[in-house]
Image: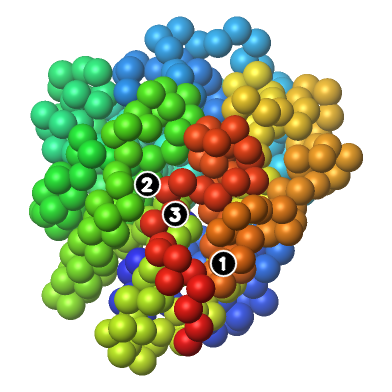
Amino acid sequence: MIGISKLYCGTVEPSDALRYGRRSKELPSHLLQFSADKKPVVVWNVTRACNLKCVHCYARAQEAGAQKELSHEEGLALIDDLARFGVPVLLFSGGEPLVRPDLMELARYAVKKGLRAVISTNGTLITREKAAQLKEIGLSYVGISLDGMEEVNDRFRGKKGAFSEALEGIRNCMAVGLKVGLRFTMNRMNVKEIPRIFDFLEQEGIPRICFYHLVYSGRGSNLVEEDLSHEETRAAVDLIIDRTKDLHDRGKAVEVLTVDNHADGPYLYLRMKREGNSRAGEVLELLKMNEGNNSGRGIGCVSWDGSVHADQFWRHYSFGNVRERPFSEIWQDLSDPLMAKLKEKKRHVKGRCATCRWLDICGGNFRVRAEAVTGDVWAPDPACYLTDDEISQVD
């Protein structure tokens, strides 16, 4: 996760994270990516059920929930363990988390236990009453997926009217004072929508957006040919940087992030160097704190059936099940070879990743994407768009 607005527009300085000792439990949510202890943010896919049929769904969500989903009591036990372990954020996802009948009770319990509770949703089920409930519970944030304006988004979601329903959900959240942001997954089918999405953010007064790079997982595995080329990715990231700066220059402090391609960090720094930006050194320091991809270390996933994964995209490999052992125990058990290597993955990456000057900043990028394309989990991430010169040159 690369905070474009934080880094390029200077809304965060290295001293901001250092002031809290870089401890996950102490840091405000907007500084969590700079923590030193990397206690994992946990994504809990509370159900596989969903009311939509998104073409790029990593969970391969379906209309009916999967069998053997964690019960309410098992969910409470999971939350107890995560709280004791010091997990800073619990992200309720799916499928569509709002389909699960006891989501409100689970989220309320997580907040009561001291966790920051957030949800990732398609937004179509958030009525004004539901938004008020989520606000009353103490939910920290609602991330709503939109992959374009009406025509494009509805095609992605597999349902006509999904955009208008999500827009109503966004407005309902904002009406009750609940922080809401957008999630946009970039690919060739929607990359031209980025300018319109920025216009939409400004028009609606939405304070946050995350631009996700495509990950080849779940139904997203069918979209490899629709992923952006390296040149298209660079153009998209530059556009995001430019539009973010334009907003901030006009006093509209929207938080803008890019997610799931940690080449964005070095790319942003190199652009700032070329521009002679006096903050480039501070940005480099913050990128070192961020440490790049943290699958299996700073982020983890619990599936609907209790399986524990390195992140929400790595569903084909489980380290264990919370029905048999607590998450905290599974997460720290280095007897699993993959878990042990992910904790120190910079020692195991191959090819251009192994000799890249940005390895400490990027963290080797997305291992699951490398495995999907090459069959080798330690091969270079094919979505890394930095040139050979950019990864070898010295300041």
Query: Residue 384: which disc?
Result: 3
Q: Which residue is mark 1?
A: 356
Residue marked by disc 2: 212
User: Which mark is in front, 1 or 2?
Assistant: 1
Asked whether the viewer can see residue 104, the reply is no
In the picture, residue 312 is in which quadrant? top right
Is disc 2 surrounded by few (<14), some (14 to 19) or many (20+) residues within 10 Å? some
Q: Residue at x 71, y 28 (%)?
A: 318
**Left or right for 207, reference 220:** left
Question: Quarter-wise, where is residue 216 in the image?
Answer: top left
The residue under the point 13% across, 53% down is 195
Question: Does residue 90 appear to the left or right of 149 in the view shown?
Answer: right
In this view, the residue in front, 201 or 221, is: 221
Residue 26 against residue 186 in the figure, above or below:
below
Q: Is residue 302 left or right of residue 45?
A: right
Residue 74 figure quarter: top right
The kind of secondary structure element at disc 2 is strand
- The residue type indicated by label 3 comes to Cys
Q: Amino acid at mark 1?
A: Cys
Please name which of the two marks, 2 or 3, marks the residue nearer to the observer.
Answer: 3
Residue 378 in view in this figure: yes
